[in-house]
Image (cartoon, helix red, strand yellow):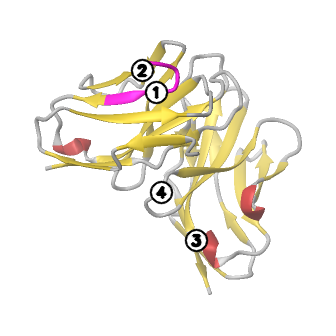
Amino acid sequence: AQSVAQPEDQVNVAEGNPLTVKCTYSVSGNPYLFWYVQYPNRGLQFLLKYITGDNLVKGSYGFEAEFNKSQTSFHLKKPSALVSDSALYFCAVRSFSGGGADGLTFGKGTHLIIQP
Amino acid sequence: DTAVSQTPKYLVTQMGNDKSIKCEQNLGHDTMYWYKQDSKKFLKIMFSYNNKELIINETVPNRFSPKSPDKAHLNLHINSLELGDSAVYFCASSQDPQSSYEQYFGPGTRLTVT
C-alpha cells in the first residue's frame, strides 16, 4: 500500500525568504504526486502535480516541487514567501497500479506560517 | 460557477439520527469521491464512484452509503450517527480515475454529532 510522510507539523518562514515543505512517499509502481493547499474553513485547492517528465514542476501561486526518485521525495518550494501563503499543505500520492478509482493517499499535512 | 458544491455547509445532529450530505459537480467529470477529515486534519478516502462502479475503503462502516442519482451527483447517507462520525466531509471529482488528473474538492461539510 502507498503512503506519504510529511515530517514537519509546522514550518515557519520569514516573508521574502525561500520556503520548503518536505514530503516523502512510498509506492509500488510509478507514483503520481500532488500538492494541495487548504486555507482555514475551506476545501483543498490543487497546487501542482508530478506525473512524468521534468523533475521540477511548476504550479499555482509561484510554487514548484522537485521530484527525486532516488530519495523518494517530492518537496514543495517557493523562492520568496508571502504572508498569504500561510495555510495547511498536503502532499498526496496515487499509485497507478491498474486498479480501480481509489482516490488519493494524503500526508498528515504541514502548517506553513509566514511571518511578516 | 462553483465547480464542486456541497450542502449543507454545517450539520449538527444527535446520535442515532440518519442524515445526508449532497454533492454536485458541474465539471463533467467521470469520477467522484468522498473524503473524511478528522479533528487532527487527517484526510482519508472513503469512497470513489465511477460509471456506476463503487469502490469502498475497507475501513468505512456500512452505516455510510454513497448514492449517485446521476453522473454529476454523489450524495453521502449516514445511518445511526455516532459521536465518532463528527468530522469535515469533502466531496471531490476528477476527470478519469485511471489517469493522472487532479481532483477538485468541494468546500466541505462540517458534521457535528452530539
Residue B104 place in picture, x, y as percent: 59, 41
Comparing A27 with B32, the one in front is B32
Disc number placed over residue B68 in the picture, else none:
2
Question: To which residue does mark 4 refer?
Answer: A42
Disc 2 to disc 1, C-alpha distance: 6 Å
Type of amino acid at the residue the image marks with label 3? Ser
Q: Residue at x 57, y 44 (%)?
A: A4
Image quarter in which the C terminus of chain A is found:
bottom right
Which chain does the residue under circle 2 lie in? B
Type of amino acid at the residue the image marks with label 1? His
Indicate which label's residue lies in the foreground, 2 or 3. Answer: 2
For label 2, the crowd category at 10 Å Cα-Cα, with few meaning under 14, some 14 to 19 and many 20 or more, is some
**Pointer 2 and pointer 1: residues touching (CB < 8 Å)?**
yes
Residue B32 place in picture, x, y as percent: 52, 28
* Residue range (magenta): B68-76
In what element is the residue under mark 3?
Answer: loop
Q: Residue at x 79, y 71 (%)?
A: A79
| Main SS of residues in magenta | loop
Residue B14 place in picture, x, y as percent: 12, 44
**Pointer 4 and pointer 2: residues touching (CB < 8 Å)?**
no
Disc 4 to disc 2, C-alpha distance: 24 Å
Q: Can you see residue B25? A: yes
For label 1, the crowd category at 10 Å Cα-Cα, with few meaning under 14, some 14 to 19 and many 20 or more, is many
Tell me if residue B52 comes above or below residue B17 in the rendering.
Answer: above
Type of amino acid at the residue the image marks with label 2? Ser
In what element is the residue under mark 4?
Answer: loop
Question: To which residue does mark 1 refer?
Answer: B73
Q: Residue furthest right?
A: A54
Sooner in the amino-acid sequence: mark 2 or mark 1: 2
